[in-house]
Amino acid sequence: MSSLFPRPVGADRDRVALRFPGRSLTYGQLAAAAHPVAERLEKGARVAVWATPTPQTAIAVVGALLAGAAVVPLNPKSGERELAHVIEDSAPAAVLAAPGEALPDALGALPRVGVTAEPPGGGAQDLDTAHEPALPAFVVYTSGTTGPPKGAVLPRRAVAATLDALADAWAWTADDVLVHGLPLFHVHGLILGVLGPLRRGGELRHLGSFTPRAAGRELASGGTMLFGVPTMYHRLAQAAEEDGELATALADARLLVSGSAALPLHDHERMAAATGRRVVERYGMTETLMLCSPRVAPQTPASVRADGPARPGTVGLPLPGVELRLVADDGTEISVYDGETIGEIQVRGDNLFTEYLNRPDATFAAFDGTGPRAWFRTGDMAVRDPDGCVRIVGRKATDLIKSGGYKIGAGEIENALLDHPGVREAAVTGEPDADLGERVVAWIVPADPRTPPSAEELAEHVAGQLAPHKRPRAVRCLDALPRNDMGKVIKSALGGRATRHG
């Protein structure tokens, strides 16, 4: 048996665990609010949580974990069709939500457990969640870009392994105060961003909704760590260039972490120029939780430990307990660390999911081999630098372009395009070409829509920064790139959106 919250409430009973706009909960209050939820749930059941950015979501999740139930986080912005699929597939025993919260019709047939942020008085319970490590803790549904979303079953051992590996890599302790405004239906905001502080015995300050001003305010008043996605850091860099107080607050934080998508190099450089600080990028997936990160010393400001200085564009080394390899198209392992040879990332370790719920075919196809030592095929393509650090070049299905005999990663071309002053946003895809096999296509949002850069200008710019074979052969202008809730560009939605061809 093991507990996800091994630190007894005891002396920490009056210490703040969670802060949301207008409401904070101490560890004692959190335990008092979560236990009534746990008492209404059965061990081994699956329960849906209406995952709004509120303390009720955190209480519901902690209560479910206390009971030994598996949490199915629901995105409140999901459409009826997607919600209906998730509910039918996961068959939750109940839905957990704040009393009076309006829920969509797709949830109408489920028994409802009301979750209040006003805990009853008295009681001296601990956050004792000791259950079998293999017991499912979460069923998190993937984005569903290639079909209906699949439910990745994450056992309790995977949650504990990931959070402890990050604590080791980032020197994350009970003294840290984490600030973020991420949604709470996903691994980043919920498992890392809520359970991470609680496992350490520290504090979470959730912004409710993200703004640079709110993030700066919380960092300036005691926050030590900030979690965000690239769109948030783009806005922070932009704001910090004009707001000295925000720049100081970011500079004084111990750790700035970006995840869920690659942080463009120009935003790395803008953050560094405005604050003197480097943003740390970590790498993971729903099915694997966290896989790689630079290691950070406990000093303030953050500095990198034995792995060497943080480098934009890399996600560091595999975390403790994570085995990682790169595999070529023919299935052979790539053993050279030359920063050039691209392979698919495959991983294994205690941090992995156990299955796709109700999808044995998809589970089997996701692994190279069978049994506990099988390698999970991530579908992400990367190179390894001579020091072993991993650089992601993109998804195998959408970001690896095979053109004229070359393998080209979309990510480095996107970074080169973003370095052009006439480009505000950029995405790169491949499309069939009779001569090249595939040609590189750039989708851009111009900095000034009235005078977008020409295709010739951008092709020359990329060829000068990278290599001639990596230049875009077509440029298509958009008003905005299609993105999901975590800020990732939805490349499958790009076709037909162009307003101008270069």
Image: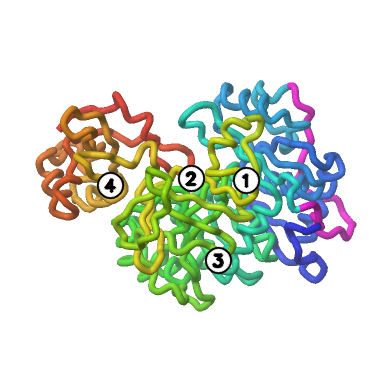
User: Could you say which disc has been placed on residue 414 in the image?
Assistant: 4
In the picture, the quarter occupied by the C terminus is top left
| Circles 4 and 3: CB atoms closer than 8 Å | no
| Magenta stretch contains residue 121 | yes
Q: Badge 3 is on which residue?
A: 223
Label of residue 353 in the image: 1
Q: Nearer the viewer, mark 3 or mark 1?
A: 1
Residue 346 falls left or right of residue 499: right
Neighbor class of circle 4 (other Cα within 10 Å; few <14, some 14-19, many 20+) is many
Q: Is residue 452 left or right of residue 169?
A: left
Q: Earlier in the sequence, mark 4 or mark 2?
A: 2
Question: For residue 175, what is the image quadrant?
Answer: bottom right
Label 4 vs 3, first from the N-terminus: 3
Q: Secondary structure at mark 3?
A: loop
Q: Which residue is mark 2?
A: 378
Going 76% across and 48% down the picture, which residue do you hit?
65
**For the point 53% across and 44% down, which residue is it?**
368
